[in-house]
Image (tube, rainbow, N blue to C red):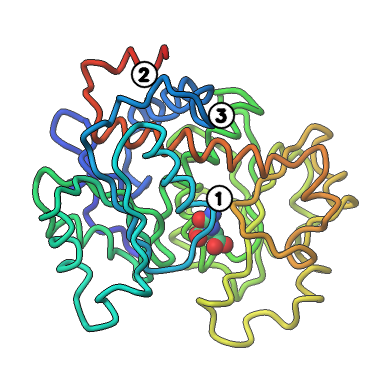
Amino acid sequence: MSEPAYPDLQLRADGTLCHLLSLDGLPRATLERLLDAAQAIRPQALGGTALRQKLAGHSVCNLFFEPSTRTRSAFHFAATRLGADVLSFDVSTSSTGKGETPLDTLRNLEAMGVDCFVVRAREDGAVAALAAGAKPSTHLINAGDGRHQHPTQGLLDMLTLRQAKGADFSRLSALIVGDIRHSRVARSDIAALRTLGCRDIRVCAPASLLPDAHELHGCTVGHDLDALLDGVDALMMLRLQRERMVEGLVPSLEQYFVDYGLDERRLACAKPDAVVLHPGPMNRGVEISDAVADGPQSLILQQVSNGVAVRMAVMLELLGDARNRQDWVSA
Ligand code: NCD
């Protein structure tokens, strides 16, 4: 998958963000600024009223052309807790079923005063295409486009890793396991890990679930999970994206768990203080056992909480008054 020219669309000349479309090409300073803001916002992210005036007068629309539980809810709460008007648009009952294009839908909502769209799309690059057609004052946030990118998931994964392992990613060994080929989460995570200076990125999947080799440059790639666990600080497990697969890429779900599932025996072969991440939705017993998912090394629900703070930080970066940045960071 070649990376389209997103940096031009998402970054202004002065380095501030206009849209958030991809973590590939996002400068380290921008990434770290978003992570710092999310960390500072965290005490207000799960409730509280201290930030409820920050985006008063702004209107945010969630436009999801694919199913979502965590991402859509987190964006909804993030916008609400910043005081924006929020429309969580149900595409299944909208005029897209009557043939309206996504860009026409967006333009109609712009005409109602929406100035920020959170978009999940089936096709790679679809959110950037909408950004290219939107008004200059409109901001787009990619909530996952096909197999391409899921930047806010990448950011919340990095925030979770930073909380657990510290900000120096150069010492971190991260292992990403599972359906890399179909995963926009893996692509965003790998881009962010590289940008933050992680030097040991390991990737494990059956050959049928790996992307083209050029996408994994600099990563250690293998098919034998047991051989990759030694010295690992963070295991990032992925769901088999069966909705994007052609048949037959894995022999059976039972065999997949035997070969690539994370259970307690395997987890014990990583570093003793290794942490486990999963973006959800989990398929228990396919890529991860109950004992690991619910065990003491799992940060899966911490990721979910961080997801609200990260989305608040992104919206403040895009819509907030940068002159008041100090207020929200210290609120
Ligand atoms: C992921 C997604 O939709 O890309 N989930 C999420 O946003 N938390 C991963 C997945 O669907 O497996």
Identify the residue shown where x is 87% and y is 44%. 268
Q: CA distance from mark 1 to mark 3?
A: 14 Å
Check whether the beta carbons of the residues at disc 2 and disc 3 lie within 8 A of each other.
no
Residue, disc 1: 219
Q: Earlier in the sequence, mark 1 or mark 3?
A: 3
Residue 223 visible to the viewer: yes
Q: Earlier in the sequence, mark 2 or mark 1?
A: 1
| Crowding at mark 2 (Cα within 10 Å: few <14, some 14-19, many 20+) | some
Amino acid of disc 3:
Ser
- Residue 148 position in % (x across, y down): 40, 61
Q: Residue at x 84, y 34 (%)?
A: 272
Q: Is disc 2 placed on a helix, strand or loop? A: helix
* 210 or 141: nearer the viewer: 141
Q: Does mark 1 have its CB less than 8 Å from ligand 1? A: no
* Residue drawn at (73%, 63%) of the image: 287
Up-down relation of residue 54 to residue 300 (above or below): above
Pointer 2 with pointer 1, Cβ within 8 A: no
Tell me the tag on residue 328: 2
Quadrant in the picture for residue 132: bottom left
Q: Viewer-proximal residue, 161 or 319?
A: 319
Amino acid type of disc 1? Cys
Q: Which numbered marker is on residue 96?
A: none
Q: Quadrant of the N terminus?
A: bottom left
Local packing at callout 3 (Cα closer than 10 Å; few below 14, some 14-19, many 20+) is few
Estimate the x, y position of residue 259 in percent, counting from the top left.
79, 68
Q: Secondary structure at mark 3?
A: helix
- Using the numbered discs, state the Cα–Cα distance from disc 2 to disc 3 in whole angstroms: 29 Å
Under mark 2, the amino acid is: Trp
Mark closer to the chain start, 2 or 3: 3
Identify the disc placed on residue 170: 3
